[in-house]
Image: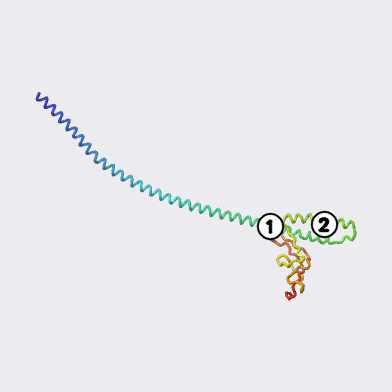
Amino acid sequence: MGKEKSTTKDKNDDSDNIENSSSDDNEKDFTPLEFSAENGEGSIDQDTENLLNQNEQKIIELNEEIARLNDSILREKAEFLNYRKRMNQENLQQEGRTAGKILQELIPVFDAFDLLLATEHNGDKAMEKFLDGSNLIRKQLWQVFENLGIELIDPDQQEFDPTSMEALSVSESEKTDKEIVKQVYQKGYRYKDRILRPARVAVEKPKSQVN
């Protein structure tokens, strides 16, 4: 019996020793794990901060690049619009020069009509009919010119304008205080801002302005 008790006591002691040993092992393992976790958490925070800083810098660089590209696009768009506007203006000017040249070639036709219509028919019915028909043709032709933008320069009794008139003769007078067109020898024509032919006129000036 004494032996069995001793054996039982030894088993109990062994059991206590195992529990104590297990408890000691847990305590030994816990401290290093907790320390390692703390170290690991600190390391992750630092890496995250570095990564955020890098991403923030990249975002700044991307925004700067986007702004630079937008500025470049706007400049190129403005240059293209200016180029297109300039080309349109040049095309319009070229069209105007071409149309003006063609119309200028037709001016002698009007001069011929004007000379013809100045003819007296002297009661000749055939001549009268011919002149009436010629006058109708001239009116129709002039209507086409007007639709194209041709303006007639007929400055009779108007103030002399050297930009649209050519003085073929000049006389003096005490009855006027400015230069006046007294007679139109040949009418002029204007196409938009271009003088196709100046009106050829006789001008009367104040006496003090005549050399």
Looking at the picture, tell me which residue is in the foreground, 136 or 92.
136
Q: Amino acid at mark 2?
A: Asn
Contact (CB < 8 A) between labels 1 and 2? no
Residue 179 at x, y percent in the picture:
74, 70
Residue under numbered circle 1 = 96
Q: Determine which of the numbered discs, if any, sits on residue 75 in the image.
A: none
Picture quarter with the N terminus: top left
Horizontal placement of 108 versus 194: left or right? right
Residue 21 at x, y percent in the picture:
19, 35
Picture quarter with the C terminus: bottom right
Residue 3 at x, y percent in the picture:
10, 25
Q: Amino acid at mark 1?
A: Gly
Q: Give the mark, 1 or 2, whose residue is nearer the N terminus.
A: 1
Horizontal placement of 60 versus 153: left or right? left
| Colour setup of the view | rainbow
Which residue is situated farthest in the top direction here?
A: 1
Horizontal placement of 116 versus 67: left or right? right
Q: Which residue corresponds to the image point at 35% horizontal and 46% vertical from the top-left? A: 48
Residue 89 at x, y percent in the picture:
63, 57
Give the secondary structure at mark 1: helix
- Asked which quadrant contains residue 149, the reply is bottom right
* Disc 2 packing (10 Å; few <14; some 14–19; many ≥20): some
Front tag of 1 and 2:
2
- CA gap, disc 1 to disc 2? 28 Å
Horizontal placement of 105 versus 16: left or right? right
Residue under numbered circle 2 = 135
Q: Which residue corresponds to the image point at 75% horizontal and 69% vertical from the top-left? A: 180
- Asked which quadrant contains residue 207, the reply is bottom right
- Asked which quadrant contains residue 189, the reply is bottom right
Above-or-below relation of 47 to 178? above
